[in-house]
Amino acid sequence: MSKKNTPPAPAIPLELWRELYQAAASFHLLAPWQWMDDTHIFGINNQHGVRLVTVMGSLGEVFGLASYRGTTGANFLLRLLHREFAPESPDARFYQDALLVDFVPRKDLRKEERAIIQQINFQPPVRKPKLFPKFQSHKPGYTPWFVDEAEARLLLDDLRKALPFAELIRTNLALYDSRQENEFPFFPASVSEPLTLEQFEWHTLVPTPTSADPPIDAHAFELSPLLALPQPSQSCWELTAFYAPMPIGEPPRPYFPKTALGVDAATGMILAFQLAGPEHTMAQTAARGLIQSIQASGRRPAAIKMDSINLIQALKPLAEALGAKVLQVKSLPMAHEARRSLEAFNRQR
């Protein structure tokens, strides 16, 4: 990602920065990861929205707080808890909707963050090693980025609520023992001092189905020239779409482009690949990749293999209009190998 194309960091009032850094410093001093782990999740529902908050650090690698926002954020966290995918999965970064604060050496801060620290004259707690708060915004399809003003206010609220909750958990570590895995205490809307665990209301959350991409309208494409092309009876292609790990630096924040790959299932030859931005769905990207594959190869496939239910349902009308049969498969070995080759090539550039 070229520096000259990198969007500027969002503007945030210095007074808000002071409050946020001070709240992070108090959280760092408390160090709740010494007795809490990622199962000690609590919820918040107020003017900043709904989120699930968890403390990071029980594994001794990353120390801080994560706030999973709304339905998308909650779904991501619940899928982690249900072990539907591993946190270290390379694709996990493309789908989480969360705000994170962790603590890093000064050398790991971006120049914009060092400038803010200097402006507000922030000094971290006297500890070794000397660590500074780092605030990051994660949104599906976008690269980790600076928080904006609304996100800074949300994270400030989370940190301030995490402190008393962590203190309560310190002496009530068995709190979750009799609860279901997806049952969480929600911070009271109105706190009666002193805060007690009895003021929290427990709610059970279940993952909601991921919204499917709308079906592709075959009439949106000029199919007549494509239908005139030959269609070998044995020709079979693999079609996939995914986020590419090569960020594009366009305002308002850098994003991961959606990428579609059309690959000959017999030879592994890449027929075409298509890039698209956040304004296009994954299915639209795949549809454009299919059309481009036909145009580039000069022929139509008799069958198209896909491993995504979302893509199958969305592209079926287009495939049928092209006279191709859609095949649902568990894996796409040729397409996945082509993807690995493309990503390896881009890492070397």
Image (cartoon, rainbow, N blue to C red):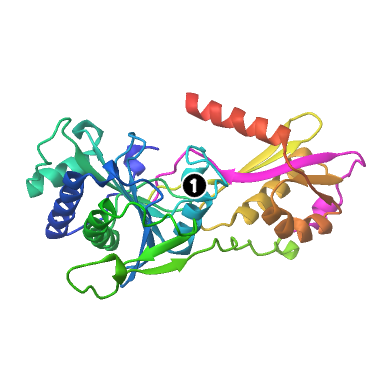
Q: Is residue 30 visible?
A: yes
The correct choice, above or below, for 123 with respect to 50 in the image is above
Residue at 79%, 55% (x, y): give it.
Answer: 319
Magenta stretch: includes residue 27? no
Q: Which quadrant of the structure image shows residue 332?
A: top right
Report the residue marked by disc 1. Answer: 94
Q: Can residue 270 be seen in this view?
A: no
> Where does the N terminus fall, quadrant-wise?
top left
Q: Is mark 1 on a helix, strand or loop?
A: helix
Q: Position of residue 310 (x, y in %)?
A: 67, 56
Residue at 29%, 54% (x, y): give it.
Answer: 147
Residue kind at label 1, given as amino acid type: Phe
Residue at 20%, 49% (x, y): give it.
Answer: 27
Q: Which quadrant of the structure image shows residue 56?
A: top left
Q: Position of residue 190 (x, y in %)?
A: 25, 75
As rendered, which of 43 and 96 lies closer to the eye? Answer: 43
As rendered, which of 108 and 342 lies closer to the eye? Answer: 108
User: Magenta part mainly helix, strand or loop?
Assistant: loop
Q: Position of residue 114 (x, y in %)?
A: 17, 40
Instruction: In the displayed orientation, state which residue is furthest to the left.
Output: 121
Instruction: Read off the magenta span.
Output: 222-251
As rendered, which of 235 and 2 lies closer to the eye? Answer: 235
Q: Is residue 135 left or right of residue 59?
A: left
Q: In this view, does 227 lie to the left or right of 108?
A: right
